[in-house]
Amino acid sequence: MTADGLPEGSVGRLHDAGRVFARYYLRSAFHIRVHGRERVPATGPLLVIANHSSMIEPQLIFGMLPRRSAFLVKAEMFGGIVGRFLLAIGQIPLKRGEIDRKPLMTAVGVLKDGGVVGIFPEGTRGTGDVGAAERGAAWLVRASGATVLPVATRGTLKPDGGRRRFRPRVDILVGEPFSPKVGPGRTGLDQGTEELRGELAALVKTLDDWRAEHGFGAV
């Protein structure tokens, strides 16, 4: 693990430049507001769990976080120049639908080094309601003892059968960090997974309710 809490082989300065780019380049296309950024712990191992309804959320959250972070990203993204760039900025390729311990062990190493790892428990893009979750996030908590930070994002999906309006409102809501205890065995992993899913789903609903109250669309 590198001294800056990123995976081996990553370049800290390039990572920082990538964060700045991610933080600002989407602002020409979206009206972005972040709520609760102050809740992000300044130090210590942190597992960020977030909902996922488009390819935009990973970029938004990566740029929004005030700390360096390594996200578990689908392996299909790691081809060619884009793939080399993702590896250079410390992102971790994950093969979906396969048992692949290497990326999880890399993520555990980042967490044990006091760093930040991001994961989307739903596994694949959908509505972002977090109706289901995979076990990877709970496994990482059990293996590392990391604090968990839920993050909800809404406003990135293009409306069904319609065009996206000019600069739609996108809201990012950072929840309260918590420290779940994931028990041993498959039962402990299943219970931990449901706890993480429930916390994230509740945060998404909180954001949905707030957006509805203020006249913004749900997704």
Image (cartoon, grey):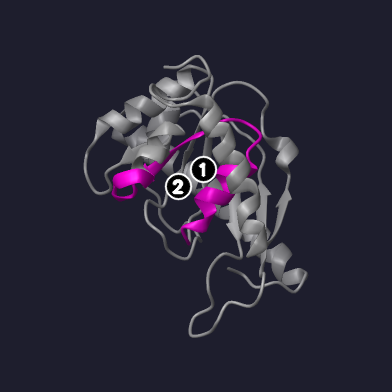
Image height of 117 relative to 4, above or below: below
Residue type, numbered disc 2: Phe
Front-most of residues 217 and 30: 30
Image height of 130 relative to 103, above or below: below
Residue type, numbered disc 1: Ile
**Residue range highlighted in magenta:** 54-82
Q: Residue 88 in the image: x percent, y percent?
A: 42, 32
Quadrant in the picture for the C terminus: bottom right
Whether residue 46 can be seen here: no
Where residue 155 sits, quadrant-wise, is: bottom right
Q: What residue would you read off at disc 1?
A: 49
Front-most of residues 120 and 164: 164
SS for dot 2: loop
Q: Residue 74 in the image: x percent, y percent?
A: 34, 47
Q: What residue would you read off at disc 2?
A: 120
Q: Is the Cβ of the residue at disc 2 closer than 8 Å to that at disc 1?
A: yes
